[in-house]
């Protein structure tokens, strides 16, 4: 049953009950009986009594409906959106939509009306997917024109009573009042997505664009403007993580996830301040002669309360909060210092976050660390993933050229998992490609993965690049890689990530003694080493 109809029925029954009580209290039925006992039958008397009770209830019900109608009219006429927007500074000059300064006032009005009418308000946060790429590729003028077209499309699919606001950059907010349940919000979200599916004609450009949508509905226990906006943005983040052209509702457990994330961020900041982060080192071996070539530095966090925290959990958090910049510099400098204590010319490999890679000061920072630590540049290997090349290949390749001019080596990590690896290899001479573990883990002679690994090895060697296999976990995999001429290998078979002291001890093992010394040494320490790594 519709909520308003259900409420009306309840109110009618209530007033009929009140009419019955009044009739009993004032003895209306008794007076009526005395008046009509000589002229009316019992049946007629009972009917008249019912009519009196019903009349009393109906009058009260009609008065209540008149009051609600008057309240709605007064609310609608209180301060129209158009009049409010005309106030100086409240209209967005680019899209001519209401601006960010207006959102709280409009939402507060609709929430007040929702209380009177027993309805709900949907707060819908909307973001354009990959809008930054439009600005980078076509320029800000085209980006501004696209925002105006997007604003027109959004405004065309909402109701007159809804409010569309531009919150800044490519962020929009829609306030949708008068809802009985979530169906109205779902219907609007689908219309919004459908309205943005067609490419946008901006001057001579046909630009495809998608949107992500986060939705939250007001409830009796949540009518706070700030909290509703926060929850809509949390739902928006979840929608963006799911890909383009999707909507997601805020769910109760999202608040718990947000609280856990905030606690982890606080703990991570404390770990940085208290030097609670550590580096572990995973050995890297020459496949042909089983010589120890060096190590890959991997970040570890041993939480005082929760124990080992997976890098898959805290590295993305560090990237989102910007903490990865200070963490990354520390990792790079500490790894270079530790490498100086290893015997021989063994190299050290350090992963660069995509966030670090966007820093225009990265080459100068690397150069300064090399100078401070005294590590020969050729012993430092910087690993990047293909993702850093996808967003802006020209800028990324220029950065790689500048880094390589310092004398360091450049390696493409997780090779084979992207879509454009071959084009990047053609444009930039990487020193090394690392074959992703997903191909090595199913390495069986005659399998598709074996054919892929063989092709990668042949291609890398033809381009003069070293090929390294990640995730080697069995002797059979190692033997196949040796047979096909793979240059280097790392994985649990050869050694898990280990503290610096164990890595230092491993450096003292004579070359070529992997079978007799290295594997037993690593196996003996496995229970004492933190898990994880390649």
Image (cartoon, helix red, strand yellow):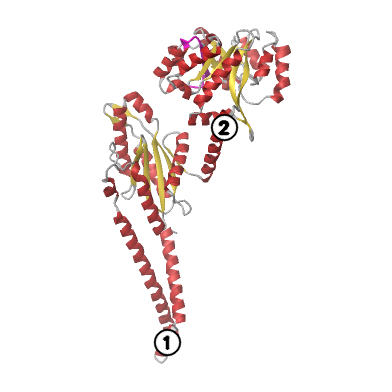
Q: Does 395 sit left or right of 275 as displayed? A: left
| Disc marking residue 400 | none
Q: Which one is earlier in the sequence, the residue at label 2 or at label 1?
A: 1
Q: Which of 155/1 is in front?
A: 155
Q: Nearer the viewer, residue 35 or 448?
A: 35
Q: Which quadrant of the structure image shows residue 394? A: top left
Which residue is drawn at the image coordinates 51% and 25% (left, top)?
Answer: 326
Task: State how far apart marks 2 and 1 are (Cα).
Answer: 83 Å
Instruction: Indicate the secondary structure of the residue bearing disc 1.
Output: helix
Residue position marked by numbered label 1 in the rendering? 31
Residue, far bottom: 38
Using the rendered view, name the quadrant where residue 470 is placed.
Answer: top right
Q: Classify 322 as above or below 440.
A: below
Secondary structure, mark 2, is helix
Q: Is residue 157 above or below residue 368?
A: below
Residue 427, image x and y in percent?
Answer: 43, 12
Residue drawn where x is 34% and y is 27% of the image: 135
Check the picture and name the quadrant holding the C terminus: top right
Numbered range of the magenta stretch? 404-418
In the picture shown, does residue 8 fall above or below 121? below
Q: Residues within 10 Å of mark 1 (few under 14, many from 20)?
A: few
Asked whether residue 16 is in view, the answer is yes
Membership of 34 in magenta stretch: no
Query: In x, y percent, where is residue 12?
Result: 42, 69
User: What residue lies at 67% left-to-right and 12% top-to-bottom?
Assistant: 507
Asked whether 523 or 265 is in front, the reply is 265
Residue at position x 51%, y 26% from top? 324
Quadrant of the image containing the N terminus: bottom left
Q: Is residue 490 left or right of residue 222?
A: right
Circle 2 is placed at which residue position? 270
């Amino acid at each position: 049953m519709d909520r308003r109809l259900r409420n009306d029925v309840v109110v009618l029954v209530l007033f009929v009950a009140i009419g019955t009580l009044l009739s009993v209290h004032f003895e209306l039925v008794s007076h009526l009986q005395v008046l009509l006992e000589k002229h009316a039958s019992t049946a007629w008397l009972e009917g008249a009594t019912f009519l009196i009770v019903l009349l009393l209830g109906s009058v009260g019900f009609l008065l209540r409906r008149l009051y609600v109608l008057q309240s709605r009219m007064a609310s609608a006429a209180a301060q129209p959106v158009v009049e409010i927007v005309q106030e100086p500074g409240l209209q967005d000059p680019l899209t001519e939509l209401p601006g960010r300064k207006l959102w709280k006032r409009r939402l507060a009005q609709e929430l007040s009306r929702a209380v009177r009418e027993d309805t709900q308000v949907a707060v819908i946060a909307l973001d354009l997917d990959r809008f930054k790429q439009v600005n980078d590729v076509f320029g800000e003028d085209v980006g501004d024109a696209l925002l105006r077209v997007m604003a027109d499309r959004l405004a065309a699919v909402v109701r007159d009573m809804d409010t569309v606001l531009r919150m800044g950059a490519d962020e929009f907010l829609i306030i949708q009042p008068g809802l009985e349940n979530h169906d109205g919000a779902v219907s609007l979200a689908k219309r919004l997505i459908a309205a943005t599916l067609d490419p946008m004609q901006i001057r001579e450009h046909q630009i495809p664009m998608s949107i992500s949508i986060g939705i939250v509905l007001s409830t009796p226990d949540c009518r706070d403007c700030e909290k509703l906006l926060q929850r809509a943005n949390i739902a928006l983040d979840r929608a963006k993580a799911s890909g383009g052209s999707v909507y997601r509702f805020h769910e109760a457990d999202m608040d718990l996830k947000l609280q856990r994330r905030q606690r982890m961020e606080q703990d991570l900041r404390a770990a940085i301040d208290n030097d609670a982060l550590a580096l572990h080192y995973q050995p890297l071996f020459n496949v042909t002669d089983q010589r120890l070539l060096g190590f890959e530095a991997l970040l570890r966090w041993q939480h005082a309360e929760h124990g080992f925290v997976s890098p898959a959990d805290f590295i993305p958090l560090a990237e989102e909060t910007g903490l990865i910049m200070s963490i990354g510099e520390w990792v790079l400098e500490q790894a270079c210092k530790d490498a100086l204590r290893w015997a021989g010319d063994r190299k050290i490999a350090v992963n660069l976050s995509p966030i670090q890679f966007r820093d225009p000061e990265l080459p100068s920072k690397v150069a300064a660390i090399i100078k401070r630590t005294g590590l020969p540049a050729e012993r430092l290997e910087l690993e990047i993933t293909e993702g850093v090349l996808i967003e802006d290949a020209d800028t990324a390749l220029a950065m790689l050229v500048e880094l390589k001019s310092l004398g360091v080596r450049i390696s493409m990590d997780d090779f084979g998992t992207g879509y454009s690896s071959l084009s990047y290899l053609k444009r930039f001479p990487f020193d090394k490609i690392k074959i992703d573990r997903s191909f090595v883990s199913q390495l069986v002679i005659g399998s598709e993965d074996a054919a892929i690994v063989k092709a990668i090895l042949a291609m890398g060697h033809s381009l003069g690049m070293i090929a390294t296999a990640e995730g080697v976990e069995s002797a059979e995999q190692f033997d196949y890689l040796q047979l096909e001429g793979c240059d280097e290998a790392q994985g649990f078979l050869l050694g898990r990530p280990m503290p610096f002291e164990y890595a230092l001890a491993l450096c003292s093992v004579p070359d070529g003694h992997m079978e007799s010394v290295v594997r037993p040494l690593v196996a003996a320490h496995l229970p004492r080493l933190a898990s994880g790594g390649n």
